[in-house]
Amino acid sequence: MSGIEVLRDDVSLDAPTLIEGLPGVGLVGKLATDHLAETFGMVHYANVHCDGLPPVATYEGGDRELTTPVRLYADRERDLLALRSDVPVSPAAAQEFATCLSEWYTDGEVTPVYLSGIGRERDEEETPALYGVGIGEGSERLAAVGIEAPEESGVVSGPTGALLSHAVRTGRTAVGLIVESTPQFPDPEAAARLIEEGIAPLLGVEMPVDDLRDHAEEIRRAKRRLARQMQEAEETSSQARPLGMYQ
Amino acid sequence: MSGIEVLRDDVSLDAPTLIEGLPGVGLVGKLATDHLAETFGMVHYANVHCDGLPPVATYEGGDRELTTPVRLYADRERDLLALRSDVPVSPAAAQEFATCLSEWYTDGEVTPVYLSGIGRERDEEETPALYGVGIGEGSERLAAVGIEAPEESGVVSGPTGALLSHAVRTGRTAVGLIVESTPQFPDPEAAARLIEEGIAPLLGVEMPVDDLRDHAEEIRRAKRRLARQMQEAEETSSQARPLGMYQ
Amino acid sequence: MSGIEVLRDDVSLDAPTLIEGLPGVGLVGKLATDHLAETFGMVHYANVHCDGLPPVATYEGGDRELTTPVRLYADRERDLLALRSDVPVSPAAAQEFATCLSEWYTDGEVTPVYLSGIGRERDEEETPALYGVGIGEGSERLAAVGIEAPEESGVVSGPTGALLSHAVRTGRTAVGLIVESTPQFPDPEAAARLIEEGIAPLLGVEMPVDDLRDHAEEIRRAKRRLARQMQEAEETSSQARPLGMYQ
Amino acid sequence: MSGIEVLRDDVSLDAPTLIEGLPGVGLVGKLATDHLAETFGMVHYANVHCDGLPPVATYEGGDRELTTPVRLYADRERDLLALRSDVPVSPAAAQEFATCLSEWYTDGEVTPVYLSGIGRERDEEETPALYGVGIGEGSERLAAVGIEAPEESGVVSGPTGALLSHAVRTGRTAVGLIVESTPQFPDPEAAARLIEEGIAPLLGVEMPVDDLRDHAEEIRRAKRRLARQMQEAEETSSQARPLGMYQ
Amino acid sequence: MSGIEVLRDDVSLDAPTLIEGLPGVGLVGKLATDHLAETFGMVHYANVHCDGLPPVATYEGGDRELTTPVRLYADRERDLLALRSDVPVSPAAAQEFATCLSEWYTDGEVTPVYLSGIGRERDEEETPALYGVGIGEGSERLAAVGIEAPEESGVVSGPTGALLSHAVRTGRTAVGLIVESTPQFPDPEAAARLIEEGIAPLLGVEMPVDDLRDHAEEIRRAKRRLARQMQEAEETSSQARPLGMYQ
């Protein structure tokens, strides 16, 4: 069986928004999506069996049931899907996933919001900048809630880049949120900002992010290994990069 | 000829349990399965010819007959199959094997029990913890005999991960037993524990493990080379790993 | 969707010339083409979705709309197309692109002008030499405007070599302009020369290049990273090389 | 043309035995087979064109005719075939060869005897042990002439392993002879033993091996380069290895 | 368009001989073939578009016309074809080329003469030995003009080995000339000898080689880079090697 295996037919969604949280540079997407899923108590909605994903099985503490490492979580109330992964995903696998996903729903039924960090050191008191990019009706959705266009030209690579590239190629609606994040460490502050200024306005919901800020140091320590893994895989890890005035 | 070649049509089995003992980290699965096969005097039941397995031939001391390096052994009395391998098996080959196997029996006819270590140093007097995970009716079987769910979230990789992943993908019943084992050395104590607390209850049989404990030092010495080989192939060797609270 | 996706059906062209500016040694093609596009205010005409291009998405500063990293720009007035890329392109991808492109127009409808540097150190007061090569009606076009044949035998490799090779293979009209450029640094002077003595006469237009000369040092600094990247990928980066009298 | 190209239709054979002499660890198989072919004056019977063999051409001193690097030699009188190779053969190519061969004759028409060394240092006065393994009617043929079963369990890898594996997979009759040989040097003494105690009894012929013993030092020196090549390619070179009591 | 593209239909040939001059160890084949083409004023007869050749385009000094890097030159008077390459060719590409070529003419219409060096140091006054090998009617052609068989057994590898191997496989007529050459440097003396004692007698023509001898030092210097490239690619560069009495 290849594709999206829905486990919860009882959860009905109506043109939901899909927040993508694959591990990338600074782990901003993963931190934000995991926070979202936990805060809203999202339910494990579907297993993802797309070709190219690593052949491993995962389990949650306290539960004997095995699952796929990449899964969709759902929140019926907020009409929301979250894509979570326990493992790094290669851009090639992300391309397969994009195809899987696009076979699963028709354009417009789901609005994907892809998340990426853009590496930039910042002082402690600085606020990381947030930009929105899109394709199809994505740009309009961003404009409607006042998320700014990027100041500089740039390129998004890695699995998130592959997902956005697939959207550009097929002309499907998609939104990309890009937040400045420290390149070397997990960046809970950037994830918090991503939620407050990007995801929350897009969804039209309130979402507390105090946890991310209060436990920033703890999170940073705990996630350091995964962040370094992402950092080392610069080639394949999701990130946006400025092209510069003269590239 | 690709697939499972049954050599003993005279051995009739009725919905048997299959214990998998491919070499993995700590060699716990292999030690336990080899012990099982020897203790019960299981007979060489089938040769495994699945694509992806190394093109080598094996023989047993005192016997001129050549066999495949991966074989099934059977115990008619206890309705039991054991999967034994003389060579390391790659996850890709394990995926092929899972397909071979699933073409050989229909879901429910055979209940596979896949074995994995999860690396953790322990003091001499400590008892290695054992967890059970499953898919399909696997979880129920574990609950029925009181094998606990894992405390922490985790991921099973390597050939055993590939076998479990195949089960998740196809929705077939499978059980996974995960035992704490020393990552660097063969761990007969963990294998003994795996049998006593996992395999024996699942099978509803008594199985002495004194041999494993009495000859622990000897076994460790003899198997060190294979264990190191598994250790070095961290990427592809079967093992469970905790995902951690924040991964 | 694979191929050339025209975004501006309102821009009608009549047998246009296509200037190729993929990043190569000395960045001469990219510098010249970017200068061309900016000077003439060329409009983003088409996205390029050919197989083999990196699965990334790009955006421009001040604009939320996502695009492909390789794009065509058009100038209706001068009947001109420019191929611009934000990312290095492998020769394999260039072969795919050549196929894409040749499926998009029939021979003669578009005249491609491929640009390459040929590494040679020069003193400050020296003028970099420029040569023209071609296939089909390409040679005649060069002769008509007096662009000289190369003095020495040579070979063009990298993506530009792949594009020219495709033209030779299919017998389609194509022009190649080869300019001496410093191998290690971006060479705005060579790009200026390429425009003045090659592109402008071919197009029969006037094109100021003062900007390239006035900001040479600034450009060199800004583009150094990309130039180095091209330099390191000697195998795959576009460049012409002399074969020498005895090779 | 892929397959076995018989050059000598005038040489008629009746259910011949095929001795395989591909280069492997200790070169025992090659030394024995080359000795056999020279002693019996076997004629160049067929060229082997199987896919996977290196695309090279070979010639013999004093002869202008080009041949394939892998060839079959025949002895009509003794109903014998010898497989000789001038180049190392990878296990993958050996698998192709096994398929080629099995398409060329039907089971039982040819009895292949595959040769392998098993690395073990020995004192000068020691005699290298010899074991026989088989599949199909192979074991019976060994028993009939009193060639002993191996004492310890083991695995045969490399091209010879691939050939034996193919026989196991297809259930065709095949014999394997395994002789102890020094792992690092060519071992003419082991090759002599292989002939005296293995090949000669199986064929029911007398075969002098004095040459191998008298020129042992000379042979060792001359073949050292090829032996080292085999030694370095431990992964792919034919050899048997003990699995050990506990592997 | 894949295959041989004839550019000069006006040049009619009648069962021509084809001299192959791909770059190999010592560059003997290339030096000899280039000398041949220049001495006889051979015309650019065909472009070679076979798959596997590098996707580059070449040009000659003083000429704007682009060509393929591998080309055939013809001499109508002497009924001669010369295969020349501006780039190293891999054995895999040579296999493709052999297939291309064999689809272009039927056996017997063209007699290919493949050239290879066999590395051997020699004193200044020594004359490099020359041998001929062949398949089909090749051996007879060699015998007819008195070119000797090789003294020792040997193997020809690299692109020339692939071309000869293809001839052996398909049973087509082909000739191989093997000349002793210094392995590390371009060897104009060996190329001269190859022409005088091999190519000239086979073609039944006179061919001055004074140029090669008079400018030996100059040629050596000029070609050193290409020779070293060939030397480093020992695996894939054309060369013959002795198998030795005991290999």
Image (cartoon, coloured by chain):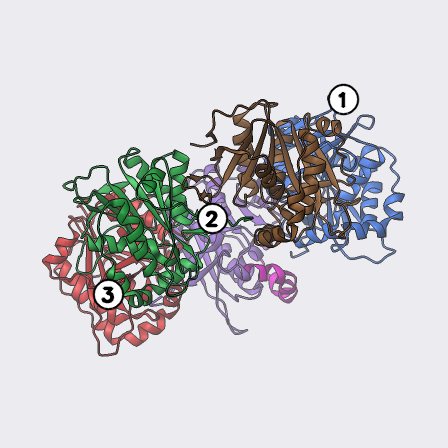
Chain colours: A blue, B brown, C purple, D green, E red
Dot 3: element: strand
Tell me whether marks 2 and 3 sit on the same chain: no
Label 3 crowding class (10 Å Cα cut-off): few <14, some 14-19, many 20+?
many
Gap in angstroms between the C-alphas marked 2 and 1: 63 Å
| x then y, percent, for residue C94 | 49, 47
| x then y, percent, for residue E156 | 29, 57
Q: Which amino acid, by three-letter code, is at mark 3?
A: Val
Dot 2: element: loop
Label ID, residue A12: 1
Q: Nearer the viewer, residue A170 or C44?
A: A170
Q: Nearer the viewer, residue A209 or B31?
A: B31
- Image quarter hosting the C terminus of chain C: bottom left
**Residue occupying image coordinates x 14% and y 41%:** D10
Label ID, residue D152: 2
Label 2 crowding class (10 Å Cα cut-off): few <14, some 14-19, many 20+?
some
Q: Measured along the vertical axis of the image, is residue A244 above or below residue B242?
A: below
Q: Which amino acid, by three-letter code, is at mark 2?
A: Glu
In the figure, is residue C185 to the left or right of E124? right
**Which residue is tagged 3?**
E179
**In the rendered image, which quarter is residue E183 located in?**
bottom left
| x then y, percent, for residue E209 | 20, 70
Dominant SS of magenta comes to helix
- Image quarter hosting the N terminus of chain C: top right
In the figure, is residue D135 to the left or right of C115? left
Tell me whether marks 2 and 1 sit on the same chain: no
Q: Residue furthest left?
A: E144
In the figure, is residue E207 to the left or right of C55? left
Instruction: Tell me which chain the residue with mark 1 is part of.
Output: A
Q: Nearer the viewer, residue B227 or D244?
A: D244
> Which stretch appears magenta?
C208-231
Res E87 seen here: no
